[in-house]
Amino acid sequence: MKNFTYYRPLSLEAAVALLDNRWGTTELLAGGTDLLDLQKEYIAQPDKVVSLTFIQDPVFTRIEVPQILPGTKPTVSIGAAVKIADIAEHAELKNLFPALTDAAAQVGGPQIRNMGTLGGNLCQRNRCWYFRDEHVLCLLKGGRRCFASDGENRYHAIFTKGHPCVIVHPSTLAPALIALGASVEVVGPSGKRTIELNKFFQAPTKPDQREHVLAPNEIVVRVLIPVEGLRNASYEVRHKQSYDWPLAQAAVAFRLSGGKATNVRIVLGHVAPIPHVATEAQKVVEGQTITRELAEQAGEAATVGAAPLSQNAYKVHLVKVAVKRALLLASGAQPDWAI
């Protein structure tokens, strides 16, 4: 690991002042579950590491659920420093946003959930083994090719159109938050700004880009989720049930009125370089009663545009399953597949 200078600012403003205006020279440290691996693998070689663990700003460190009164449009605030385990176990969040709490409960293992933070989960680097190998000069490290495109790609993207780099976005919380209409508040040298979460992620193609649109000198402060009374659920298909990333994920949210689903949102995770909004599947469900047959049709529609690589065509079927089951869970159906 390259030597670095370690800073422990006590406020967000002080932390921002320590950041540089280009990527690579400074890194933020929260739970450390991603950064330390990147440093040990010589993928991240910062001159400065700025710890966020001593900042006690309540907006940054707490979950705030306002009183929900008829006729109001309250917003839940979850600080970026909140541990993933605290999100998974929060009773009010479970009631309002089961898609989020269920996704949080599946992240890594207990140790990871008790160290990892919301901000870190959203801003983590991708898990492509070519990117993580210090000896491989891929597109994201200044090379000329994506080695996964025609290499070992069984865990990579199936929605690849327009993406020269075929990573999958690693955040399991992001699809649920996008389906719930969340936004992120960030702070930088010019003050605070708010970004809709469905516009927060990008597909990087070169070393001076990350998997999000933050500037190098900006920090995620909190996530804001509107309370809209939406039915919601998240379903993941995994290779194993502990310490693993999903092979495919579907997060859904919709309003149920007169037995019909409206304002339908279906977001796929771990199948594209950014969380993938399944617009064709949304069209299938919008204005309809959710039945098993309709959920199957939505699953089929969710695969429109998929272009599997040489080793990951199996993910197409997993997307169908994940969408179908997420819709049924959100509609209140009993999960007979778990019997």
Image: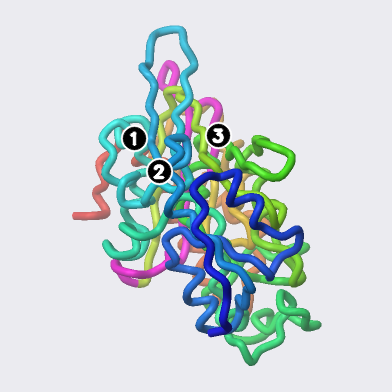
Comparing 251 with 299, the one in front is: 251
Mark 3 or mark 2: name the one nearer the start of the chain. 2
- Image quadrant in which you'd find residue 138: bottom right
Tell me which amino acid carries mark 2: Leu
Residue 235 placement (x, y as % from top left): 39, 51
Alpha-carbon distance for marks 1 and 3? 15 Å
Residue at the limit of the structure toward the bottom, as seen here: 135
The stretch drawn in magenta includes residue 16: no
The answer to whether mark 3 and mark 2 are in CB contact below 8 A is no
Which residues are the magenta region? 240-266
Comparing 111 with 240, the one in front is: 111
Tell me the element at label 2: helix
Residue 175 placement (x, y as % from top left): 51, 48
The label shown at residue 93 is 1
Residue highlighted by disc 2: 100
Mark 1 or mark 2: name the one nearer the start of the chain. 1
Alpha-carbon distance for marks 3 and 2? 12 Å
Comparing 286 with 131, the one in front is: 131
The stretch drawn in magenta includes residue 257: yes
The answer to whether mark 1 and mark 2 are in CB contact below 8 A is yes
Tell me which amino acid carries mark 3: Gly
Taking 35 as reference, is 147 above or below it?
A: below
Label 2: few (<14), some (14–19) or many (≥20) C-alpha neighbours in 10 Å: many
> Which residue shows up at 26% across the image and 35% down it?
91
Residue 311 placement (x, y as % from top left): 56, 80
Residue highlighted by disc 3: 181
> Which residue shows up at 55% across the image and 27% down it?
263
